[in-house]
Image: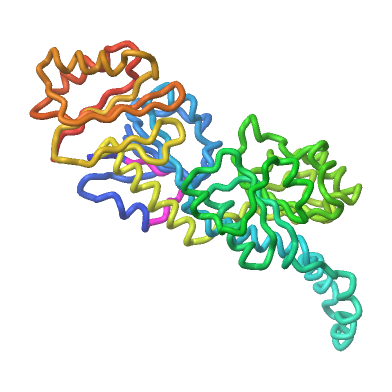
Amino acid sequence: MFKIQTLNKIAMIGLEGFPREQYEIASEILNPDAILVRSADMHSMTLPASVKAIGRAGAGVNNIPVDQCSKRGIVVFNTPGANANGVKELVLAGLLLSSRRIVPGIEWARTLKGKGKEVAPLIEKGKNDFVGPEIKGKKLGVIGLGAIGVMVANDAVALGMEVAGYDPYISVEAAWGLARTVRRATSLDMLLAQSDYITLHVPLMDQTKGMLNRDKFALMKKGVRVVNLARGGLVKNADLLEAMKAGTVACYVTDFPDDDLLTAPNVIPIPHLGASTPEAEDNCAVMAVEQVRDFLQNGNVKNSVNFPGCALPVMGRNRIVIANANVPNMVGQITTVLAADKINIADMMNKSAGDLAYNIIDIDGDVAEAQVEKLRKIEGVITARLIAKT
């Protein structure tokens, strides 16, 4: 029986993916095998020794102590693309809101309450104060062409925008998904200089923190509109406010507003609604559960942020899964230990990423827990687990 701890409310359609005869699920549970989380901050949490995996129902993992998990061999999963459509729709709304002055227009219209028959003529007279351009025919720069960026780029093309994308690390899969008319920007500076609208779709890392700063704003067109539904730290707020005061940035739409932006003119602060749709929550929950279940039952790793992807079909054999430091001769030491106990390997996969490696080893015949314990004693092995054939 596997034990699953939930730190947030996880959509029931996802939890139903855990067979009740094999899984126990609760928000308070002793010695969980895996933890499911959305936005709960886990950095101050003491992770039980029993934890083998953490499933994040969403893409960002800033709330999870990934480095600590890696040292302990805990596989951290996320769900890239599961909430992409929800975020994409809000980005498109952000483009329109940044252009058409809809929000200030609504706020002004509400001030007319109580004026009775005067409302209609006042509306007609006052509407000229909220004129804004259409997005059709304008140039959109998309920074980051992952699941969300590709969807934004394609739908912006469908809305009649001229779209350019910048992503030096674009995957082959993402490239295949891009509309043919999306142009490739050869540099970030080129994209910033040519765009009427800019939207950010990159993770927050040391390399991307504050990527839109005073120097980058200086490259932009006067009146550019910026949409940031990725992470707040990608933009330096002080430099943004300077650029807005100078007229460089006409509007900034963000899903991560800080205190210094809440009352700034021409900032549209959205309360982190990008993935706040029932569909996105369901998709993330289903994907997170599928990945955690496949790992616990079969040892397969898909969409991990700290371990390499590694999967073998289940063929009804006993299976050993091993997480280890990515150093020379690990595979040799592992196979030597197995050979000494006359254990025959039927199939094996070894993958590495950075400082970590992961192995799936299918065994012909039986294998005992005592034999797996010998693998755990190899220097550099972080975890070793036996998955008995069913």
345 to the left or right of 380: left
8 in the magenta segment: yes
Does residue 7 appear in this view? no
- Which residue is pictured at 32% across the width and 32% down the height? 31
Looking at the picture, how far across and down is residue 137, in whole percent?
Answer: 74, 65
Which residue is more in the foreground, 215 or 161?
161
165 to the left or right of 360: right
Please state the extent of the stretch shown in magenta in the rendering: 4-12
- Which residue is pictured at 38% across the width and 53% down the height? 286
State which quadrant residue 238 falls in: top right
39 to the left or right of 390: right
212 in the magenta segment: no
69 to the left or right of 141: left
Is 379 located above or below residue 387 in the figure? above
Is 273 located above or below residue 119 in the figure? above
Which residue is more in the foreground, 70 or 9?
70
Looking at the picture, how far across and down is residue 291, in whole percent?
Answer: 35, 44
Looking at the picture, how far across and down is residue 274, in whole percent?
Answer: 59, 55
Which residue of the protein is positioned furthest toward the bottom in this rendering?
A: 117
- Which residue is pictured at 61% across the width and 45% down the height? 144
Which residue is more in the foreground, 70 or 359?
359
Is 264 located above or below residue 132 in the figure? above
State which quadrant residue 349 falls in: top left
Assign the C terminus to one quadrant of the image: top left
